[in-house]
Image: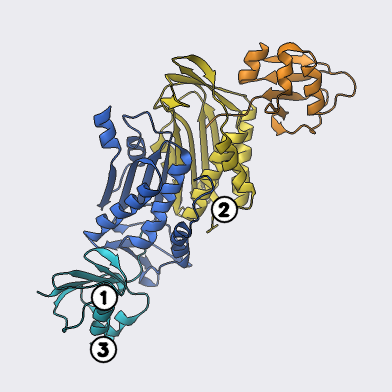
Chain colours: A orange, B cyan, C blue, D yellow
Amino acid sequence: MALRILYFAALREALGVSAEDFDPPAGVASVSALRACLAARGGVWERLSAANVKAAVNQRMAGGDAPVAPGDEVAFFPPVTGG
Amino acid sequence: MALRILYFAALREALGVSAEDFDPPAGVASVSALRACLAARGGVWERLSAANVKAAVNQRMAGGDAPVAPGDEVAFFPPVTGG
Amino acid sequence: MSAQQKVADSTRVSVQEADFDVGHETTALGDGRCDVGGIATFTGLVRDANDGSGVSAMTLEHYPGMTERALADIVEQARARWPLLSVRVIHRVGRLVPGDRIVFVGVAAAHRGEAFAACEFIMDYLKTQAPFWKREETPEGGRWVDARDADDSAAARWSAGAAPAKG
Amino acid sequence: MSAQQKVADSTRVSVQEADFDVGHETTALGDGRCDVGGIATFTGLVRDANDGSGVSAMTLEHYPGMTERALADIVEQARARWPLLSVRVIHRVGRLVPGDRIVFVGVAAAHRGEAFAACEFIMDYLKTQAPFWKREETPEGGRWVDARDADDSAAARWSAGAAPAKG
């Protein structure tokens, strides 16, 4: 079972992708490992390495250490600007 | 020309007076001197000596040192409780 | 636009027996201008209990003339501290029952921090500087409400250089 | 009375394209109960300028599902800090023009200090924790709004034990 990955706002626009199903390589079990793995695609994907890219796991804000497991919904996005 | 003196709320009720025109003795030229002079009437008037009685001169909050002069409107009242 | 700004830049203060319309008052603070980022409001209501006693009604006495002046002074102090766009203060007098609105303070500003700070500042000062007195009706009879020490300290924190962290 | 209290004790959170009625929302926070001493509200509006450019419109993107959850979490954090009676949060999404309402936060409590603090806390956390993103239309084209450092520090001051002086 893959991860469901979502991208929002400026990041979504830059990547040209709003969502994907992704089977991470074995050993990719945290938000930061997943980020590094996606950024390794190169090109626009290197934007995922930017320090200000935020993440959520299963719809809750998550730090780099947060675990990710098959079936999780993981989102990457710029700092929020609502309100 | 006398002072116009007003009393409000619990103080007005205790004194049984809401307003009076008062010619202070010569030398009574500050809020605290006026308070002492009125309190010297004795009985219920001694309530004017209470530390928590506030004063206004010409419709602005005034400390004990504030000057009072003929024609002024001076008010005495308990701490305010609006809002 | 400048005529509307002139109107909206104003301070409006009312002391009245009549109730007021919170939606109308809040909306009016931003009407006709597009530089308002946020509007903070406070509406005070009559509670049915105070100091352990039931309150069936209260009567608000005030000092006509001084009241309006005191409220305007308080708003001017807030305007000297923060860049405010429009300010509205309404205080009711006369007899009120639990659930009734007593007071409304609304502040429009470019940024929320200023609107929140000024709105709370005006309420804190109003509580200690504006000449209103509440007399409550309880099962034990009528009684004048005692001033709360908490209100004095709430007002005092503004003069201790205790401006909110974000200014 | 207890059935009404049950309703009014609730938290209501909405994410919607439609506008809202500030008067109705504010009044509803106190309806049917007489233990509310004050209601603090904040209404955020679209400004016609930002970072020196004119803004003719903006579009709010969000993360459906997470948005509602994040807002509910923020309100729960506020409830854990202060005794609140009712809380209402509304955030609009979609296309908005200057002067339009974006967000509403209303908090009813027994005392004003709690209502003010919780209302500002919810706004500060919403600004940094709720997944909304603004894209502005300006004469130079569309642009995503940058997060403001001031918003991070506004939220951070609540975790530095910097509770308002009067709690």
Q: Position of residue B23 (x, y in %)?
A: 13, 79
Name the mark nearer the viewer: 3 or 1.
1
Amino acid on which the number 1 mark rests in the picture: Val
Rounded to the nearest angstrom, the CA distance separating label 2 from label 3 is 48 Å
The circle on residue B31 is 1
Identify the residue at image location x=74%, y=23%. Answer: A49
Identify the residue at image location x=70%, y=32%. Answer: A60
Q: Residue furthest left?
A: B1
Chain to which mark 2 belongs: D
Above/below status of D156 relative to C95:
above
Rounded to the nearest angstrom, the CA distance separating label 3 from label 1 is 18 Å
Amino acid on which the number 3 mark rests in the picture: Gly
Mark 1, other Cα within 10 Å: few <14 / some 14–19 / many ≥20: many
Rounded to the nearest angstrom, the CA distance separating label 2 from label 1 is 43 Å
The circle on residue D123 is none
Residue B53, image quadrant: bottom left
Quadrant placement of the N terminus of chain C? top left
Q: Camera-side residue: B51 or C57?
A: B51
For mark 2, give the secondary structure. Answer: loop
Above/below status of C66 relative to D149:
below
Residue B7, image quadrant: bottom left
Q: Camera-side residue: C53 or C60?
A: C60
Name the mark nearer the viewer: 2 or 3.
3
The circle on residue B42 is 3
User: Which residue was labeled with disc 2?
Assistant: D83
Q: Position of residue C86 (x, y in %)?
A: 34, 40
